Image (tube, rainbow, N blue to C red):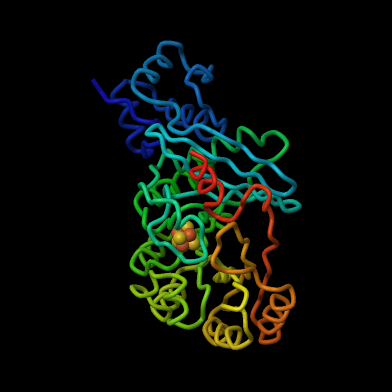
Amino acid sequence: MMKKVPIRNLTFSRLQNYLEQKEQKPFRFRQLCNWLYKKYCVDFEEMTTISKKFRSELAEDFLPLSIFVEKRLQEEGAEKYLFRTLDGHSFESVVIYDQQRTTLCISSQIGCPLKCAFCRTGEVPFQRNLTQAEILEQYVLIHRQLLPERQITNLVFMCMGEPLLNYKNLVRALKIMLAEEGFCISGRRITVSTVGIVPALRKLGEEQLGIQPAISLNAPFNSLRSKLMPVNEKYPLHQVIRAARQFPLAPRRRLTFEYVLLGGTNDSLAHADKLVKLVKPTRAKVNLIPLNDYPGCPFTPPSPEAVEEFEKYLRDHHVSTFVRKSKGQGVYAACGQLTARYLEKK
Ligand code: SF4
């Protein structure tokens, strides 16, 4: 007997093979995908255009879901979801509202092995990679909560974990997100945020998926970056920036660099000057993210004046710069914060 697997763990070709084995007509593939990826179905009984007999066969062979919403915290402009997996782990996703835009920050791992010094996810013990289904189901379950009032417009792999350390499941999930039979999201609306795992970044570029990378820099000097992000010892700045420049971008798109501003650590004009020199030769924009601190955080947020001066310095040197407004402090929207609090209380 076939072991029950979550149905969204199947690639399209495996799903087609299964349907052929079951002697289903070719139209069944599109019909099933429609329920799974357009109607966000979480129970085979909801699939009313499919015969009762085949619905019960699906239920015998597959699980309709492999994660469950354990907690939902809302405040103006942001929402955070804590999920529970079948093997009892917790992880989270964040939704950020901004005028016309609804951005889902999606997780790729449970915990994160990279332990960046300013990130609370680093405190959550790394457990494992999320499966293809667990990645896709974040979108499904959150969309079910938001519809019909809101529709997710943008997707960012930026919550818990380093997506390029979960390469196989990330790419499989991305292919379903992009496909016409899948979520059918434009690649221009999907961003994969990474510290710059150089070989995986190159490979992702070769896949030609049309998605956008965002490179998390956070320091313009190797010595400081290695202190903040130990992964820099393995993939130093010049290697990361070279791989980022080679990433194929959609026409008129710019590379995104992310820079978390830490008060008195990386927010001086000397840092801004070096940052300009690093990113200027590239068609790039810089997202400045003032630290969203948390109890026990070893860094302090930058002063508003430091943020303003840093931003002005970059703009004066013709680098497109955006300051990301801090949303969701009430729901602990800095990555990993909800899970860390939840684990504290257990
Ligand atoms: S910032 Fe990203 S890569 Fe670094 S520890 Fe946090 S989740 Fe991991």
Visible residue check, residue 210:
no
* Residue found at x 42% / y 30%: 29
Q: Position of residue 325 (x, y in %)?
A: 70, 62
Q: How many marks?
A: 0
Q: Toward which corner of the image does residue 149 lie, by quadrant?
A: top right
Q: Toward which corner of the image does residue 3 lie, by quadrant?
A: top left
* Residue found at x 54% / y 71%: 255
Q: Is residue 336 above or below residue 137?
A: below
| Residue lying at the far top of the rendered structure | 53
* Location of the N terminus (image quadrant): top left
Visible residue check, residue 276:
yes
Relative side of 180 to 62, left or right: right
Q: Position of residue 101 (x, y in %)?
A: 69, 51
* Residue found at x 61% / y 52%: 333
Q: Is residue 57 above or below residue 302?
A: above
Q: Position of residue 191 (x, y in %)?
A: 53, 58
Relative side of 80 to 159, left or right: right
Q: Position of residue 43 (x, y in %)?
A: 49, 22
